[in-house]
């Protein structure tokens, strides 16, 4: 087999096993090839075994037990749209075993072509897509195999904003790091999943039959946008393991830790494995609403839009808006695997997140108590302005 073919097979193997994070793993592999000392020990072990064609068990190399390694076997999909890394030969055997259940993209019938296809003009600038950009193409094409639907909900954030201010004032006085909107929204997601655990399920074909995979642990994938030195950007989706078993303080620490390690290039192989649900926040760049792609293996991905006043009121002074009772709001979307989750379930889940962010079910009370804030949070109430309506 030629070196070019070997490279293509290796690239395909990484794409299949790391899904949305394949670009990151490819960059680590490039570093390893130039100088193994540029990557940490767990990645060195993994890449050495991978390039030697030996059986790869990255979760064991990273210090996990054999039981966890078996849990990340090809029978269990990763949240990033792939099975956990295994040897190339094992992956081939697994693919052969499941071939009757679903046609491989490589053998699927090609779509009908138009009768005449215009050739690119001589003046056209055609650039082949390679490297990280090619991985994105491959991941997006793979995501087309997941039949999805999307629910949207508009949520006022006045109470979220006010309680966040109180929390951060308290934390700042004690030299502790701030809480972001995303921290609180992600925590509301985790709490809502306790009432709607079916959204944490996954879909797989087991022994040729479609199956719902029940998963107790909520491994929350958090999308992290990273800027490269050349000005381009890449997206990593590591996860917080067993987020539903944490207190808010523990969750806050775990969230900040995974973001810090992502920005410092210190993520480990297990950080990408076993994602069950994801949160992405395109609102940080002003996007009002988004319908992200759902990777195979996950039940749902939540996207939050920009936190802002309704467009028709944005020319008004904030003081006037406050007197009118108009607050900032955000759009939150739930894109789900329609084979195992129905629209009513997705909608009810978003309604629960809405209720939590309005302080119901003692959401903020518990956050304040866990952070050892002794006074109560702000409460949601009906806004009445006698100057407008008399009385």
Image (cartoon, rainbow, N blue to C red):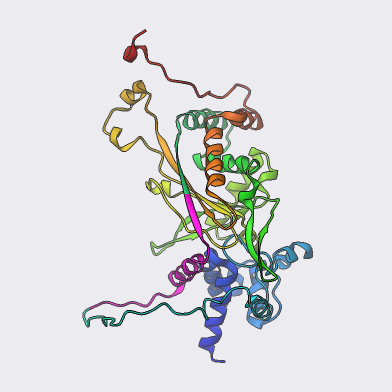
Quarter holding the C terminus is: top left
Q: Position of residue 145 (x, y in %)?
A: 52, 66
Q: Report the front residue among 292 and 318.
A: 292
Magenta extent: 124-150
Quarter holding the N terminus is: bottom right
Residue 142 in view here = yes
Residue at 53 percent of width and 74 percent of height: 30
Q: Position of residue 119 (x, y in %)?
A: 27, 83
The mark tally for this picture is 0
* 379 up-or-down from 344: above or below: above
Residue 260 in view here = no
Instruction: Find out whether residue 137 is within the magenta segment.
Output: yes
- Quadrant assignment, res 214: bottom right
Residue at 27 percent of width and 77 percent of height: 125
Q: Position of residue 126 (x, y in %)?
A: 30, 78
Instruction: Find out whether residue 136 is within the magenta segment.
Output: yes
Q: Position of residue 28 (x, y in %)?
A: 55, 69
* 200 up-or-down from 93: above or below: above
- Quadrant assignment, res 203: bottom right
């Amino acid at each position: 087999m030629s070196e070019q073919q070997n490279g293509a097979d290796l690239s395909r193997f990484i794409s299949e096993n790391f899904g949305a994070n394949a670009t990151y793993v490819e960059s680590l592999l490039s570093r390893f090839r130039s100088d193994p000392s540029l990557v940490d020990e767990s990645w060195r072990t993994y890449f050495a075994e991978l390039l030697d064609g030996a059986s790869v068990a990255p979760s064991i190399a990273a210090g996990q037990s054999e039981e966890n390694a078996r849990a990340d076997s090809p029978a269990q999909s990763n949240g990033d749209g792939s099975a956990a890394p295994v040897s190339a030969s094992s992956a081939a055997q697994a693919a052969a075993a499941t071939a009757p259940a679903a046609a491989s993209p490589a053998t699927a019938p090609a779509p009908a072509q138009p009768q005449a296809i215009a050739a690119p003009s001589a003046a056209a600038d055609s650039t082949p897509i390679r490297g990280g950009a090619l991985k994105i193409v491959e991941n997006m094409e793979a995501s087309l195999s997941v039949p999805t639907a999307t629910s949207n909900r508009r949520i006022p954030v006045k109470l979220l904003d006010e309680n966040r201010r109180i929390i951060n004032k308290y934390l700042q006085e004690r030299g502790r790091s701030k809480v972001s909107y995303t921290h609180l929204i992600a925590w509301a997601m985790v709490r809502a999943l306790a009432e709607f655990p079916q959204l944490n399920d996954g879909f797989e074909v087991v022994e040729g039959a479609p199956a719902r995979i029940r998963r107790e642990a909520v491994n929350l994938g958090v999308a992290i946008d990273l800027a490269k030195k050349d000005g381009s950007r890449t997206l990593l989706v590591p996860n917080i393991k067993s987020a539903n078993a944490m207190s808010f303080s523990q969750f806050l620490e775990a969230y900040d830790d995974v973001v810090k390690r992502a920005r410092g290039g210190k993520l480990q192989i297990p950080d990408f494995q076993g994602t069950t649900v994801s949160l992405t926040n395109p609102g940080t760049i002003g996007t009002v609403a988004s319908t992200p792609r759902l990777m195979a293996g996950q039940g749902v991905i939540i996207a939050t839009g920009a936190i802002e006043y309704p467009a028709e009121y944005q020319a008004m002074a904030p003081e006037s808006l406050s007197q009118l009772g108009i607050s900032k709001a955000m759009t939150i979307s739930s894109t789900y695997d329609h084979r195992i989750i129905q629209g009513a379930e997705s909608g009810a889940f978003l309604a629960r997140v809405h209720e939590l962010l309005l302080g119901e079910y003692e959401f903020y009370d518990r956050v304040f108590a866990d952070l050892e804030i002794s006074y109560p949070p702000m409460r949601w109430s009906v806004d009445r302005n006698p100057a407008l309506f008399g009385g």
